[in-house]
Amino acid sequence: MGVTKHSFVLVTGESWNGQHQGDIIRINVGDGFLAYDRLQTIRHELRHAYQYDVMADSIAHSEIKSTIDSWKTCSEKYGGSYVTFDGTNWMQYVTQPIEADAREFAGQPAY
Ligand SMILES: [Zn+2]
């Protein structure tokens, strides 16, 4: 077991608030995003980092198998598929288990 190192990268000029890809967490610190939204975004993306560590079983955790399995349905690494928000599929995007969990953790509205 070894904890994965996640890198934080601050970006500007993107239309999204945050992004977690591989081991890199990108946070948009450009104009137009409120400080509170940014904090929620950081919490949300850190939760994704946690989810990936749990799925990889690289950290101690207390998540139950059904939760982990539901997250894996959203990860191609584990044979699932992740729905990327394309501007039209908001409900499909936010209700997939990995996003619903991150939104709940970050205190963001469910939908
Ligand atoms: Zn997310």
Image (spheres, rainbow, N blue to C red):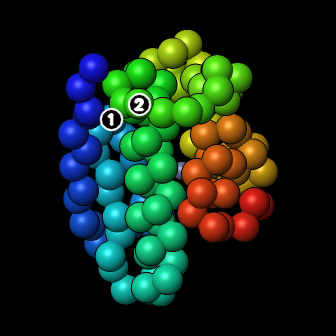
Q: Is residue 89 visible?
A: no
Toward the top, the furthest residue is 79
**Residue located beneath label 2 in the image:** 60
Is ligand 1 within 8 Å of the beta carbon of the residue shown at mark 2? no
Q: Is residue 6 left or right of residue 58?
A: left
Q: Is residue 77 left or right of residue 27?
A: right
**Residue situated in front as seen by the camera: 109 or 31:** 109
Q: Secondary structure at mark 2?
A: loop
Residue at image coords 27%, 20%: 1
Residue at image coords 40%, 22%: 56
How crowded pointer 1 is (Cα within 10 Å; few <14, some 14-19, many 20+) is rated as few
Is ligand 1 within 8 Å of the beta carbon of the residue shown at mark 1? no
Q: Quadrant of residue 39?
A: bottom left
Q: Is residue 107 left or right of residue 17?
A: right
Residue 101: percent from the left, percent from the top?
64, 47
How crowded pointer 2 is (Cα within 10 Å; few <14, some 14-19, many 20+) is rated as few
Q: In the image, which disc is placed on residue 59?
A: none
Q: In the image, which disc is placed on residue 22?
A: 1
Which of label 2 and label 1 is nearer to you?
A: 2
| Vertical side of 72 occupied by 37: above or below | below
Residue 68: percent from the left, percent from the top?
60, 26
| Vertical side of 15 occupied by 76: above or below | above
Query: Which mark is first along the chain, 1 or 2?
Result: 1
Give amino acid for label 2: Ala
Give amino acid for label 1: Gly
Residue 21: percent from the left, percent from the top?
36, 41
